[in-house]
Image (cartoon, rainbow, N blue to C red):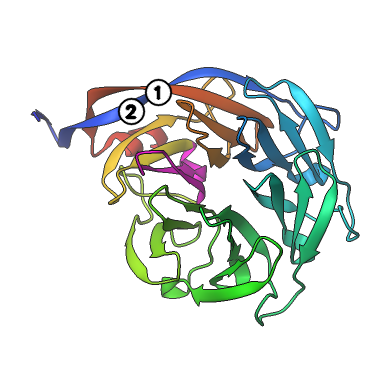
Amino acid sequence: MKTIMLVALTVVSLVAFNWTYQGMWGKYGFGNSQFISPGFIAADMSGNLYVSDVLNSRVQYFTPTGSYLGKWGSAGSGPGQFNDPSGITITNNKVYVADFGNDRIQYFTLTGSYLGQWGEFGSGNGQFYGPRGVANSMQGYIYVADHNNHRIQYFTDTGQYLGSFNVAQWASPFGIAITHDGKILITDSSKCKVFIYTLTGSFIYQFGEWGHNPGSFMSPRGVSSSPDNNVYVADGDHYIVQYFTQHGEFLGYFGGYGYGPGQFRGPWGIVIPGNNLIYVTDAANNRVEYFSSDTGVEPISIGLLRSLYH
């Protein structure tokens, strides 16, 4: 592995995945395939994509190339209604949605038929104060980032409480994902860190800090893991996606501020269905973009991210 030296910059070469823009769909609006601040995103076993359309108070779902399939939800607090639909995950052919403003989890069939819910406002077991991200384990358990209670709670797929743990440094968990080898990834958008835990809440390690260098963040939001357990983070206020080894070693990034293809004005949710594609919701551009990967070796400048914003 070679090292390239530049004046006032440290540059190292890293083996990384290079992500190439493939397509996008969506624009601002209230109609089908339109969004007002798309949030988190999940994929089913067929590769179809489910998006929490936050300010439209609904979930929309699409084929892997963005063809519209359907929607459900409306504003409110009744069954099947939402007040800021947030995290979304799919297991056992059921769609679980964190209903942030209603302090509950709702779940549905793949076509949006209401199945059930659990949770209410509070700090007790099974209660929430702003549930944000949601993920599922291989066992089908549901893990919830209980944002304002500074903890993770986990449940059976019908909402039976199993356990909880507080996140280090009184963090407010935002995005959550579970790796293929069974580790929990948690982002904290205010502390600009990624925390890694076991499925039962034992701390493993953390990485990240506020800043403009590779591996530092400004408001990390959604997080996902590839089949090789690499970690992908939607770095919201850097307008990029950064990716790392499972040990937190920086590998690369893609994106950048803008309105054009492959650019972001608010990357939020992120999912890797395992088909060599990665999907990212772009909240401020009201769209979903997707990218394909190959591998290569490229120089990474320690000052590179700083040059993007200053």
Of callouts 1 and 2, the N-terminal one: 2
> Of helix, strand and loop, which one carries label 1?
strand
**Up/down of 105 relative to 304, above or below:** below
Q: Where does the image place residue 31, in percent across and percent down from the top left?
A: 86, 28
**Residue 82 visible in the displayed image:** no
Q: Which residue is situated farthest in the bottom direction here?
A: 124
Q: Which residue is mark 2?
A: 17
Q: Which residue is mark 1?
A: 293
Q: Where does the image place residue 69, in percent across and percent down from the top left?
A: 78, 27
The CA span between labels 1 and 2 is 6 Å
Residue 128 is covered by the magenta coloring: no
- Residue sitting at 66 percent across and 80 percent down? 123
For this view, does 285 lie left or right of residue 169?
Answer: right
- Residue sitting at 69 percent across and 39 percent down? 51
Residue 225 is covered by the magenta coloring: yes
Amino acid residing under circle 2: Phe
- Nearest to the observer: residue 193 or residue 66: 66
Q: Where does the image place residue 174, in percent across and percent down from the top left?
A: 55, 58
Circle 1 Cα neighbour tier, 10 Å, few/some/many (<14 / 14–19 / ≥20): some
Q: Quadrant of the C terminus?
A: top left
